[in-house]
Image: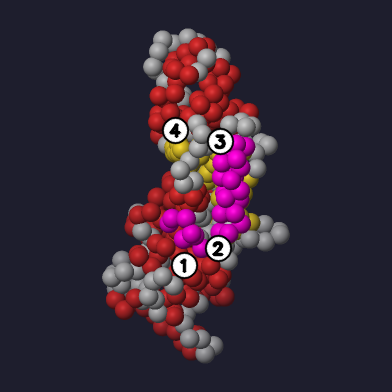
Amino acid sequence: MGAGELYGRKPETDAIAELLAKARAGTSSSLVLRGGPGIGKTALLDHAAVAAGNMRLLSGTGVEFEAELPFSGLQLLLRPALGSLTALPGPQREALEAAFGLGPATGSEPMLVGLAVLSLLAEHAGETGLLCLVDDAQWLDRASRDALLFAARRLHAEGVAVIFAARDGEGSFPAPGFPELRLSGLAPEAAAALIDRHPLTPAVRYRLLAEAGGNPLALLELPVALTGEAGSVFSPGALPLTGRLQLAFHGQVSRMPEACQNLLLVAAADDSGELEVILPAAAALGATVEDLSPAEHAGLVLRGDADGTTIRFRHPLIRAAVYQRAPLAQRLAVHRALAAVLTAPEHADRRAWHLAAAATGPDEEVAAELERTAARARERRATRPPRRPANGPPA
């Protein structure tokens, strides 16, 4: 999206416009954008780059597999500005050249590197001002992060605007003292305007709006994922996820310990969120309540009530990602484990659907269970079964 094409982000774009106006007037300032995957941080950085006009631009992205390489993130960000190195004081220039492997290792203090970054940004700003954008700041190596934050804290009248974007729940980007904007889901009106760029039936549109929860990436990608579905209807189970959504949501899940992933899969396969059901089923896969802690710490799941007896996924698409990334054999095992736990009469319908989801071929016992479920639904004058986990997590 370019400048002016963002939906429901006027407060954020106004804050960016103010930041850029200050830089053009010679005043430096910084901003940290925080939020979950797909919430629009990168789109706001793109918007800022376009809105910057004739200002100079430096942009970089933290790379997870380079997070242990000192100064790797800083080198990528400052590479276009290295032509201004000669204007730096000797000790600062030598410190930065050593950090980037452009000169002999000097064993210089981190403070010298930070001062060199500060001087380089000020020099590169020139007469037009400079916009410095850092995406996925949570994956910056520590040396780069420290140098950039050191410099950003000391910017004053150089005409430099710095915007960091950091994803919640992954990596770490502590930035105490910096102004922050925390992005949440789009308001209903903005979400509807975004999704209405795609021709959808009313039923599909309603379902997508509910599943996306205001997440802009989901609102953009889920309609694309439905392309090719017969009649634009949902096949049984979870909504399909495109590659971009898989990267955004699967990455968080894959970093959890194996036992935690198993427990999350159980929770994704049974949407009740009831720990008295989830934990016994997860125990069959070797997971315990302690294995939930990493997911809670990362913000993947939240306590669903005050007494802590239920959990819920922070976003419906995290639940979908947890389920869809699991191998088929593991999904079948989870549904069998849930069916084994749901033995109480009030859970008969849920048990039937989990047995159906675990079936790999015709099964008369399961068919009989489903018939009894249908009969109970008719007695309640229900228009559909209460849950349907077959071929995906319960809808």
Dot label at residue 57: none
Q: Secondary structure at mark 1?
A: helix
State whether residue 64 appears in this view.
no
Q: Nearer the viewer, mark 3 or mark 1?
A: 3
Q: Nearer the viewer, mark 2 or mark 3?
A: 3
Name the residue that disc number 1 marks.
194
> Between residues 349 and 189, which one lies in front from this camera angle?
189
- Which amino acid lies under the numbered mark 3 shown in the image of this protein? Val
Q: Secondary structure at mark 2?
A: loop
Q: Earlier in the sequence, mark 2 or mark 3?
A: 2
Q: Residue extending furthest front?
A: 127
> Between residues 300 and 95, which one lies in front from this camera angle?
95
Mark 2 in CB contact with mark 1 (< 8 angstroms): yes
Q: CA distance from mark 2 to mark 3?
A: 27 Å
Name the residue that disc number 3 marks.
160
Residue 4 horizontal/vertical position (percent) = 48, 59
State whether residue 184 appears in this view.
yes
